[in-house]
Image (cartoon, grey):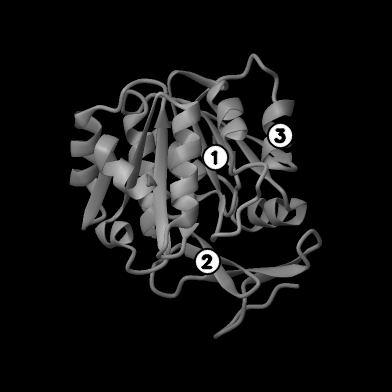
Amino acid sequence: MSTTGSGHHVASRYLRTTGQHATIDADTLIEGSFILSIGGAEQSHVNLADPREIFYEYLRRIGHVVDLAATPGAPIRALHLGAGALTLARYIQATRPGSEQYAVELERELLDFVLHKLPMPAGTTLTTHIGDARDALAELGAEVTFDVVILDIFSGPEAPAHIACKEFYEEAAARLGPDGVLIVNVGDEPALTLVRSQVTALREAMQDVAAVAETGMFEGRYPGNIILVGTRRRWTTEWTVELLARGPHPAAVLTGMDLDRIAG
């Protein structure tokens, strides 16, 4: 079903796995941009005219971590666990042409829908995999290692137990190169219960962990997103300085003892 016109969806698709509808609408405010919604809730924003422009604040922060993960402009190998509208895959292709990317998505129809209606930039190397994030990680040959693994499937305090755990993070860490980073988007309530548990789990699997977010998120004022970054080396103050400078503002980066206070 495709309809156009004022207030209508550009396209919609029924998702069998969850029984929800996905829709893609043109963003009337930003030329060349589209919004993916699932079950009526906005889920992703894509700027086809300039994929380097990321609309959602938390995705911009993830993009800035990816910027630091390797020499600027150099191609990387990236794994996206939870694909959405592939906003970050588009960003990586735009900022690091020639990167080799893998995307894992539970919803077959969603990935087909997105790739059909919002095609990837020419020259993108993207391998897609339908299935559970943890299963997919195991199925990718052990010889495949990544510079960046991005996990974006936690959308609230109810997280899949087999993924929100130390064992999963250990499996992901084993797939990272020596300089590789594991980036986890945690959507949470003001109490930060999920954030606390994931900091603890990540710290058991990685050499170091940092948390990046809008400053108020750490004060437990409102629900939102906190980005956790697990590294295989010690976190550097240079990265903290860079991420604070790049924003979006106001920004906070917590590591070490500062993060202990959040983690409990």
The residue drawn where x is 51% and y is 37% is 201
Tell which of 76 and 142 is nearer to you. Answer: 142
Q: Is residue 249 left or right of residue 92?
A: left
**Residue topped by disc 2:** 35
The amino acid at mark 1 is Ala
**Residue topped by disc 1:** 122
Q: Secondary structure at mark 1?
A: loop
* Mark whose residue sits in front, 3 or 2: 3
Q: Secondary structure at mark 3?
A: helix
Q: Is residue 144 left or right of residue 74?
A: right
Residue count near mark 2 (Cα–Cα under 10 Å), binned few <14, some 14–19, many ≥20 = some
Question: Is 5 placed above or below 77 here?
Answer: below
Image coordinates for residue 157, horizontal then vertical, percent = 54, 59
The quadrant where residue 14 appears: bottom right
Distance from Cα at disc 3 to Cα at disc 2: 27 Å
The amino acid at mark 3 is Ala
Q: Is residue 47 visible?
A: no
Distance from Cα at disc 1 to Cα at disc 3: 26 Å
The residue drawn where x is 69% and y is 51% is 111
**Residue topped by disc 3:** 136
Residues at badges 1 and 2 in contact (C-beta under 8 Å)?
no
Distance from Cα at disc 1 to Cα at disc 2: 21 Å
Tell which of 257 and 136 is nearer to you. Answer: 257
Image coordinates for residue 58, horizontal then vertical, percent = 39, 54
Tell which of 147 and 98 is nearer to you. Answer: 147
Q: Which mark is residue 104?
A: none
Q: Is residue 118 left or right of residue 32?
A: right
Q: Is residue 221 visible?
A: yes
